[in-house]
């Protein structure tokens, strides 16, 4: 399966440089939520309106997003778009690698799901119950997973197996959202709600 060729810590550092408080997992989740709900989402819109919460033409935006951060985040955007639009089901959640402790990875998965739900909301999804098929139940499951950081972990083999199953569930859920939401997608939203 294809993976995003950027280090998790690189994106975290890039986000800090532009004063985004969310971690790379949450930002990636929100980006994926936007891809599910917004038709023709562009990197410029995502960077200028969603991450910085300022209008695209605002000169301060250009100053705040230094070129290195902007370049890394644009790469994350492009790689994510490529994965989500591919037919080979190569989509991967952007999470810390397997060398990170299980607690850190579970917390990141929780943040990813929180971000995904936020991205759906930013893209205009206001009534999950009105979604087609299994999507309302999937939203409920993602809400539960977003609370996963409060679960007790023993770092044993069973917890690791459960964690990997959750990741696979979320991957499949995102693919279902991409497939089912095409008919409901909106153009880039006009509201500027987003990360502060």
Image: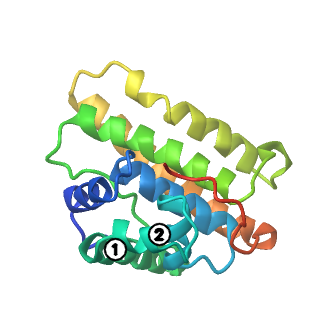
Dot 1 corresponds to which residue?
A: 70
Question: Residue 126's mark?
Answer: none
Q: CA distance from mark 1 to mark 2?
A: 8 Å
**Mark 2 Cα-neighbour bin, 10 Å: few <14, some 14–19, many ≥20:** some
> Which is more toward the observer, 145 or 156?
145
Dot 2 corresponds to which residue?
A: 47
Answer yes or no: do the residues labelled 1 and 2 have beta carbons within 8 Å?
yes
**Mark 1 Cα-neighbour bin, 10 Å: few <14, some 14–19, many ≥20:** many
Q: Is residue 32 visible?
A: yes
Tell me the SS state at disc 2.
helix
Q: Residue at x 49, y 77 (%)?
A: 43
Q: Residue 160 at x, y = what percent?
A: 27, 36
Q: Residue 180 at x, y = what percent?
A: 73, 65
Q: Residue at x 44, y 69 (%)?
A: 61
Quarter residue 34 falls in: bottom right
Q: Is residue 78 above or below residue 49?
A: below
């Amino acid at each position: 399966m294809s993976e995003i060729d950027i280090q998790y810590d690189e994106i975290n550092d890039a986000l800090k440089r532009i004063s985004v408080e969310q971690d790379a997992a949450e930002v990636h989740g929100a980006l994926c939520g936007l891809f599910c709900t917004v038709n023709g989402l562009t990197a410029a819109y995502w960077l200028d309106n969603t991450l910085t919460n300022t209008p695209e033409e605002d000169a301060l935006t250009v100053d705040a997003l230094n070129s290195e951060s902007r370049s890394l985040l644009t790469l994350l955007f492009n790689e994510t778009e490529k994965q989500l639009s591919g037919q080979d089901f190569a989509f991967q959640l952007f999470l810390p690698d397997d060398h990170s402790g299980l607690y850190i990875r579970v917390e990141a998965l929780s943040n990813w799901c929180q971000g995904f739900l936020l991205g759906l909301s930013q893209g205009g999804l206001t009534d999950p119950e009105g979604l087609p098929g299994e999507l309302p139940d999937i939203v409920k499951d993602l809400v539960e997973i977003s609370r996963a950081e409060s679960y007790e972990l023993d770092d044993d083999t069973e917890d690791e197996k459960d964690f990997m199953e959750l990741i696979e569930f979320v991957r499949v859920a995102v693919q279902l959202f991409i497939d089912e939401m095409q008919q409901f997608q909106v153009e880039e939203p006009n509201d500027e709600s987003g990360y502060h």
